[in-house]
Amino acid sequence: MQCFFVSDLHGYELRYQTLWEMVRQEMPQFVLMGGDLLPFGGAAHLNQHSYDNFVQQFMIPGFSQLKEAMGSSYPRFLLILGNDDPRYFEKDILAGETQLLWTYIHNKQWPNTPYDFWGYAHTPPSPFMLKDWERYDVSRYVDPGCIHPMDGRHTVQISQNLKYHSIRNDLDLLFSDRILHRSVVLFHAPPYGSNLDRAALDGQMLDHVPLDVHVGSIAIRRFIEQRQPLITLHGHIHESSRLTGAWQEHIGNTHAFSAAIEPPNLAVIKFDLENPNMAQRMVVD
C-alpha cells in the first residue's frame, strides 16, 4: 500500500515531470496531490511555456502519456485544488477524471477497503485576493491583514450564504459520525499551531498588532485532535519546514505530513498505509 504525496506544484512543469518519472520508476499504488496545482502563483514564472489552460494543455496530455506507458501499473491519483487554483478550472479537472487519469476528491470520500481517502480543499482567510477556496475557519473573525472570503475575487459565481460557511461546519457535514482510524484525509491547509503552519511573519506588526506566525486552520486542528484519522496530508505554507525543521507531526495517534516546500524544489512524501511511522520525505532540486 505504497503512497506518494505532493503538494503546491504551482503549475511548474519540471515538478510534474520529476513526479511522473518517480512514479514510473517506483510504481506506487496511490499518488495524492494536495492542491495549488496550477500556474497562477508560486513557481509559475519558472516555466518555459505559458498556458491558456494548464489542465487541458499540459496536465491531461502528460498524465495520459504516463498512463499509456505504465499500463496496469498506473497508480490511482487522488487530488484536490488549493487556494491559488482558480475554481474556474475545476470543470477541466473533472474532465480529466472522466478520462480516468485521476480522481477528484474535494469534499468527498473515495472508499478503498480497508482504507478510505477523503479530500477537503478550503483554507482559512488570507491576505490574498483570490477567494475561490477560502472559508471562515471557526468563526467570522479574520486575522489582521487578511481579507474576508466575501470581499476578494472569485472566478465562479458564489452564493451570498458563503458568509455563513466555515471550515468547522464543512468538516462536521463531511465526516458526520464516521469512524476514521483507517482514513487518510487530504487537506490543503495545515493544522493551526503545528510544525506545519509556520509562516515567515516573525516580528511583523500591523496597526501595532503583532501578526501570528501560525496561519493554519483551527478547525482542522480540532478535527484531528477529536476524530484521530490515521493520516492527514497538508500543504499551503511553503516555508514552514525550513523554519521549523519538520515536515511531519504526531497529533495524538494521527500522522500529519506536509509536502509544501519553497520553489523550485519538489518534496515527495513516501509512506506505506500499513506502516506510516516509516514515512520519508525526498526533496528534489
Image (tube, rainbow, N blue to C red):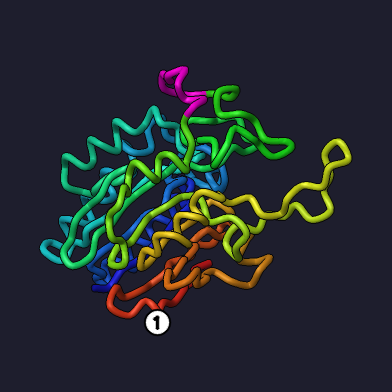
Kindly identify the amino acid type of the residue bearing the numbered disc 1: Met
Stretch in magenta:
154-164
Give whichever of 226, 239 is nearer the camera: 226
Give whichever of 162, 155 is nearer the camera: 162
Q: Which residue matches tag 1?
A: 278
Residue drawn where x is 50% and y is 72% of the image:
250
Classed neighbour count for the residue bearing mark 1: other residues with Cα under 10 Å, few (<14), some (14–19), many (≥20)? few
Tell me residue 269's x, y (percent).
42, 69
Tell me residue 39's x, y (percent).
48, 40
Give whichever of 176, 66 is nearer the camera: 176
Residue drawn where x is 77% and y is 47% of the image:
211
Residue 158: say if magenta.
yes
**Is disc 1 placed on a helix, strand or loop?**
helix
The residue furthest left is 72
Q: Tell me if residue 36 comes above or below residue 154 in the rendering.
A: below
- Asked if residue 19 lies left or right of residue 139, the reply is left
